[in-house]
Amino acid sequence: MGIVYTTEVTPVDREAINALYGDASRYERFHDSFLSRLAYDNGKLAGAVRVISEGVETALLVDLAVSPEYTDGEPGREAILSGLLSEIEKELVNRRVMVYGSRDLLEVLEGAGYGRCKNAWTLFREGMKESDFLPWGYRFESEFEGEPPRAPGEGGPHGADAGVKSRPDGARILIADGLAKASYAEVNEVLTKAFFGRPHDLAKTEKAFSNSAYAVTAWDGERLVGVARAVADGGAFATILNVAVDPEYQGLSVGKRLVRRLDEQIREEIVVLNTHPGAVGFYNRFPEYRRNKYVFEKHIAGPKPQQSGEAAEKRPERPQGGEPGGRRPGGPSDFRARMFTPAGYRFPDEY
């Protein structure tokens, strides 16, 4: 019969799920998750994974695990893990998918097309394994080339801040829990301004913030000047998203205050954030955050639209050339090199 995958999490799974993780509360987390997949081998739970998401553009996969009795036999551990990933990805088309993984999942995740993030941080708390994290302030070799990494608000592409500049006349920035009196249109405007004027979809912004467990805002009087939010599962994991500051107020530590206010609110055990290379300098200024070695990411692309006839004949060819291997400055390969370690890359303690 082989492995059967299901989305149904019912009370009959309670003991099996809790036993898989050695945690008496894990069933409730699966039951309340945005999505989940369970793998069964002849009626016996063989593995599972679940998803934390606001249902818009991002998803965090957690608790990817297989029963320890499955090793290299048939079906093997890696086959079940790969099957769980493949099945859950079907529900996450056109999403940025992150995985909170571990050292023993390296080969499986790389084989499934996930890149190991260079720019993922976790709020480091007592009891966490030191070997899962890089030292505070760590930078990869490429981040020492040329000018030091620019923090958001210092010309980087991310919408937070970390520099030092004079305060706008009369500005006294207050941080508030939740959206306070902000409209979704105002939130959308801050996101658009903070990210180089790239238009944000108002309907998606409303859904993302309304489906988030936590949100904070920054105000100069009646003016909304900063936002941030976090998606969470109510007990184990939270991920911080959309840290954005109006460009006129970047460089005043507004972004840092937003993140720390979220930290005060979040009740979950593990707080993770994954951002752009331009934010390295910003998040490296947080001694409480450490770069995580085992967060992975992949964009789950949807089917390409079919073209036929004259439209297909006129479709331009993709540009060729550039650097060896097709890597062009600022192109997809260059972006991937900045975002992820090369496939097969290992830190010294992983050999």
Image (cartoon, rainbow, N blue to C red):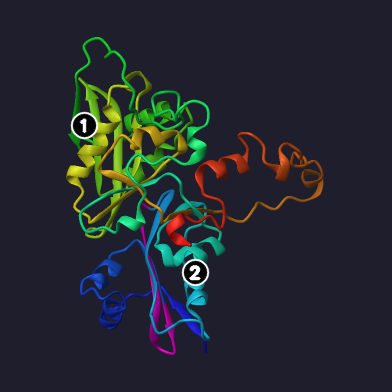
Q: Would residue 182 be seen by someone viewing this image from the given angle?
A: no
Q: At 76% from the left edge and 38% from the top edge, which residue is drawn? A: 321
Q: At 28% from the left edge and 65% from the top edge, which residue is drawn? A: 32
Measuring from the top left, give residue 7's x and y in whole percent. Answer: 40, 72
Span shown in magenta = 39-54
Helix, strand or loop at label 2? It is helix
Label 2 is placed on what type of residue?
Glu
Q: Quadrant of residue 337?
A: top right
- Eyeballing the image, is 232 above or below 163? below
Q: How crowded is mark 2: few (under 14 residues within 10 Å), some or many (20 or more)?
A: some
Q: Is residue 238 left or right of residue 86?
A: left
| Residue 230 forms part of the magenta stretch | no
- Eyeballing the image, is 310 above or below 88? above
Measuring from the top left, give residue 243's x and y in whole percent. Answer: 34, 36
Q: Nearer the viewer, residue 7 or 273?
A: 273
Label 1 is placed on what type of residue?
Lys
Helix, strand or loop at label 1? It is loop
Q: Which of marks 1 and 2 is nearer the N terminus?
A: 2
Q: Would residue 96 be seen by someone viewing this image from the given angle?
A: yes
Residue corresponding to mark 2: 87
The Cα atoms of the two marked residues, 1 and 2, are separated by: 41 Å
Q: Which of 69 and 312 is in front in this view?
A: 69
Q: In which quarter of the image is residue 38?
A: bottom left
Tell me which secondary structure the magenta stretch mostly adopts: strand
| Residue 50 forms part of the magenta stretch | yes
Q: Which mark is residue 181?
A: 1
Q: Residue 231 carries which label?
A: none
Q: In this view, does 183 lie to the left or right of 305?
A: left
Nearest-to-viewer mark from 1 and 2: 2
Q: At 45% from the left edge and 46% from the top edge, which residue is drawn? A: 118
